[in-house]
Amino acid sequence: MAESRDDFIIAIRSAFLKKSTKQKFSLLTLVFFSIFIIVLSNFNFKAITVTKSIIKEIVYRSSFIVSIPENFIKSSYLNLNEYTNYYKEYKTTREELDQLKSENISTKIIKSENEELKSLIDGYSFTSNKILAKVIVDHESPFLRSIIINKGSKEKIKIGTNIYDRSYLVGRVIEVNYTNSRVLLLTDLNSNIPVSITPGNVQAIVVGNGDRKGEIKYIKNDLINKIFDKGIAYTSGTGSIFKSGIPVGTIDLKDKTEKILINFYSDFTQLKYVFAEIDELMPIAVEIEENEQTKFSSNTEQIKLDLISDELQILEESNTKFLEENQELNTLTNELNKQIEILKAENDFQKNVIQQHNLDQDELEFLRLNLIYSSKCQSKKLFSTGFKVGTPEYKECIMRKGKTSD
Amino acid sequence: MIKFEKKSLFYKVYIWLPILALFISVFNEFDLNYLNIDYFSFNFPFILIFYFALKAYQRFDYFLVFVAGLVNDTVVGLPLGLSSLSYMLICIFATYLRNITISPNLIKDWFYFLFIISLINSINYTVLFLFFSYELDITLFIVNNFFTFLFYIVFSIFFKRFLKSLDD
């Protein structure tokens, strides 16, 4: 028993301490050294940070060079796959392009209005420049999903900088060196993205599933029914980790495990170049502010003017039509007025004729009665009751058939 | 069979091949990820380090293995020193096995290797989870462990041929 224990101790001692002629350090020394580095690397002393940064710079560059043959094989394999699906993808892309073109116009308007409103909210304006960065290392660990890009603090990249593939979100920077940075991909288990899901405007957190998809977590149970397949998830901007309104992916409810998954728009295994968004908070000086605002507003105004000019053209066309119709109606009215005047004249003439005819009838009646009753109404002697011929009284006496008074 | 002039440059490169392969694998993270096979990964450095430490290969410098661990941590994004510690532990266990073994047996080595990588992966998982607050999927660790164990037997055949070629 004691012998076997001695053998064990000798074997252990030998394993830890004995070093062959070719070995410079014993394993025990290196184990302690490893633990020392682990502990030391957690302190944020400047010397340690600089050393770590230098090691990383060297390793990333070396890794990029060493990876060239494997990357060549990888890209050849992927190219072969791409060629087989080339036609199918072409058709899909074309359809998508048509749809995007139509959506682009409305997006432009919304964007310019959004910028204008943002500049109104506070006196600061975010100037964001997207800089192109090359992915120099994309070796996925089985447990962690991250990439290394060739832009670092030299290009004003900071921890938290958003990284895009075209306009789709890829991840955020978690480690910055002078000329390169590490980007934590959205698929990583440590990645949490606050999102809004349309339709329904459901707020949720998407967590990477460590593989190729994201999983929706931290959502109210009663809101789960509001989520539909193929719904669009975009960043909500909650927590200011990611900017709002960046497309993330589409909902996938076909999973057998009943988890709500997200298919990311971007394929993170195919990233060659990405965009890093450099945000700078620029206070707007009074004079500059005016210019900037004028610029912003001029852009917006331009779009609005275009819209208004379109409306104006339509109005002018309809106005011309109305004017033409109006003129036609005026002409018709004038003609009708003329006809009315003619008819009036005719009417007056007819009336005159009738009046004349009535006068003639009265005269005729007077002459007839005059022949009968003139003796009764004429004054022949000095004390007679008659009237002088031609006077109105005489005429009235004749019309009353010789009666001199009522 | 390959025959070398012992002073030729090619021979010098050839005898350093295990270390070169180790550095290429840690720089490159050679794990056939681009094949996009779900739940497939294996740890080539573990296999290589265990085999050559077990065989006490003269050119397999532990310090270089330690440096390779640092490189791996930097490339993968793990806390600096963790892979070095894992590699050193593999070396210690392999040396211990070598010291207590009188007649080497591939199958026994194979299962001993499974025990070691399981232990080291458990240590890694615990350290990352408890001390560094990493969110990790234990399934991926188990799968990685399993495939590393499976591939050991395949790679050991190649490594045996390599050592034999040097002996010849």
Image (cartoon, coloured by chain):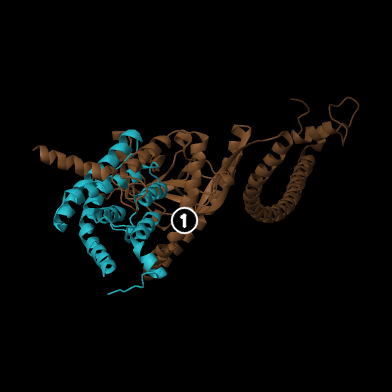
Q: Nearer the viewer, residue B1 or A342?
A: B1
Asked if one can make out residue B137 in the rendered structure from this viewpoint, the answer is no
Q: Residue at x 64, y 51 (%)?
A: A306
Label 1 packing within 10 angstroms: few (<14), some (14-19), many (20+): some
Q: Nearer the viewer, residue A171 or A372?
A: A171
Q: Nearer the viewer, residue A126 or B6?
A: B6
Q: Where is residue A173 shown, x and y percent of the image? A: 47, 43
B36 relative position to A177: left or right: left
Q: Residue at x 23, y 43 (%)?
A: B119
Q: Where is residue A163 shown, x and y percent of the image? A: 48, 47
Q: Give the residue at the far left of this rendering.
A: A1
Q: Give the residue at the far right of this rendering.
A: A382
Q: Where is residue A151 shown, x and y percent of the image? A: 54, 49
Quadrant position of residue B151: bottom left
Counting labels gives 1
Relative vertical location of residue A71 with respect to residue A227 in this rendering, above or below: below
Secondary structure under tag 1 reads helix
Quadrant position of residue A313: bottom right
Q: Write down the colour of chain A.
A: brown
Quadrant of image for the N terminus of chain A: top left
B18 relative position to B98: left or right: right
Please give the residue where the numbered disc 1 appears in the rendered image. Answer: A62
Relative vertical location of residue A90 with respect to residue A298 in this rendering, above or below: below
In the figure, the cyan chain has which letter?
B
Quadrant of image for the C terminus of chain A: top right
Asked if one can make out residue A269 in the rendered structure from this viewpoint, the answer is yes
Q: Chain of mark 1?
A: A
Q: Where is residue A282 shown, x and y percent of the image? A: 63, 37
**Residue type, numbered disc 1:** Ser
